Amino acid sequence: MNWEVVIGLEIHTQLSTKSKLFSGAAVGFGAEPNTQTTLVDLGMPGALPVFNKEALRMAVMFGHAINAEIGMSSVFARKNYFYPDLPKGYQTSQMDHPIVGKGYLDVMLDDGTTSRIGITRAHLEEDAGKSLHEDFQGMTGIDLNRSSTPLLEIVSEPDIRSAKEAVAYVKMIHSIVTYLGICDGNMAEGSMRCDINLSLRPKGQQEYGTRTEIKNVNSFRFIEKAIYTEIERQADILEDGGRIIQETRLYDPEKNETRSMRSKEDANDYRYFPCPDLLPVVLTQEYVDGIKATLPELPSQKAARFQSEYGLSEYDANVLSSSRAMADFFETANTIVADAKLTANWVMGELSKLLNQEQLEIENAPVSAKAFGELLVRIKDNTINGKTAKDVLQAIWNGEGSADEIIEAKGLKQVTDTGAIEAMIQTILDANAAQVEQYRAADEDKQKKMIGFFVGQVMKASQGKANPGLVNPILTKMLKG
Amino acid sequence: MSIDKQDVQKIAHLARLALTEADADQYQHSLSSVLSLVEQMQSVDTDGVEPLSNPLEMTQRLREDIVTEENRRDAFLANAPQTEAGLFLVPKVID
């Protein structure tokens, strides 16, 4: 049977506020256990929450970025469940009146097609603490530092139809929240976590099949793999005439499988009700418009500008604008180089290759945008050729100095003296008289292929320093005799 | 409207309350009468009335995003029956 996959995603993004959503405790990853907690976070009787202004601003900003309706009056609700990392017995969240209503994102896939993914809502809620299941006298250890950390949960419509589309959507959300500066985007530290709702239906059928939810997937790669394995699992069951059980599952990256989380039937009976400790959050149009005016240039806008201002292709513009750090690196380097195509090619080519090899993000690259730009200038003005430039980039990367210092120290300057090149070519022609003979006897098409041999010899003799732009015409002329 | 004993036990379980048989009988009776009152109220025409999320006619005040609290871990941990390595210890939970 031909199955169609239907996916909806819930993305929890941790907002980068200084203090917690409802208390004045510090927010931060990796602090000593329970050193960033207050009576409010511990759920002590009588301790009352007070809502963080900055979390509100960040949520409204996100709403604008996805073209959403902003909830002018939003209400906090209690989601009731018992777990030791949530001492209050409820999570303060939003249900009927979220801060961000319906919006959408246009997501571009690798093949250049665009699809519009609807966003149902985005609501503010507090995170829970952490349970540590290592053996503490046969007990579980509880660290409440993360408790009441502000989260924005972004819920998509079931509009996603493939693993690739899901990853493109999550990358787009990642790129937007980091552009806005409302989330550090550090997935390894849990700043962005994704729940995947997935079902299959026979192609052409309108009704949705029964779905499962895969909880807490925390990397782009795992999202893609978890989706592939879950599609396969569900398809196998359906092909065998079985039925899917609606349940929560966990993705295990080591075994590359999803498995059922043992949860009680009534685990989802959360009995939401409006939180009596918090009043409705009422916004003015002036406040909402004021935040809209502070929106930075978003990835899609930047991509459009890169095309119109620099004449880059749509693909290049999208790749460069996908991360704010990469876009900034490109633009800073290009102010020095003043050749956008050359700069784009080198950022996306050699630099990205080195970053991948070392598994580094561009913001941590050992080569600054300025140093990188200075190197490209030397390609542009023909001081060095592309091949030499790769070696120089590696040397800058290794901390050997600036492009000019390295070119000077290693004597890498291209030979641009025509006299010297002519002399070099003559030596090669003399040493390869037979090939010259063959060349002269061949027709024009063949000659074009044969000239590569001579170019290679010249480059070898010059140790890669001869300027290819000069070698070619001189060589062609001298071969004619 | 009335609820049965099973409903009472389910509600008790969700609230992590242990009920004896006698307790369950009593709560079945009192919860049913609360629900009867709710049923009576439901006959009121509420068309065009905004649902109320809070009886106070006020809106939420906001707090500046400033860290105002210091580390008081020792004081907090002192209330717990068992601690280790700065953690609160609870009976083992595996999910």
Image (cartoon, rainbow, N blue to C red):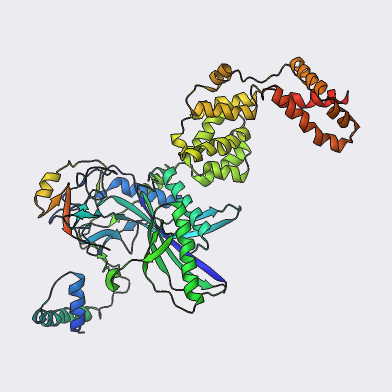
Q: Residue at x 51, y 67 (%)?
A: A5
How many marks on residues? 0
Task: Name the spot of residue A312 as percent of width and height, x first.
Answer: 62, 40
- Image quarter in which the C terminus of chain A is found: top right
Task: Name the spot of residue A343 as percent of width and height, x first.
Answer: 59, 33
Q: Image quarter for residue A346?
A: top right
Asked if residue A174 lies left or right of residue A407, the reply is: left
Asked if residue A270 lies left or right of residue A226, the reply is: left
Visible residue check, residue A66: no
Which one is in front, A36 or A106?
Answer: A36
Up-down relation of residue A265 to residue A283 (above or below): below
- Image quarter in which the N terminus of chain A is found: bottom right
Visible residue check, residue A400: yes
Up-down relation of residue A240 to residue A213 (above or below): below
Task: Name the spot of residue B36 as percent of width and height, x first.
Answer: 19, 82
Up-down relation of residue A421 to residue A191 (above or below): above
Q: Residue at x 9, y 49 (%)?
A: B78
Which one is in front, A70 or B77?
Answer: B77
Asked if residue A287 lies left or right of residue A361, the reply is: left
Q: Image quarter for residue A246?
A: bottom left
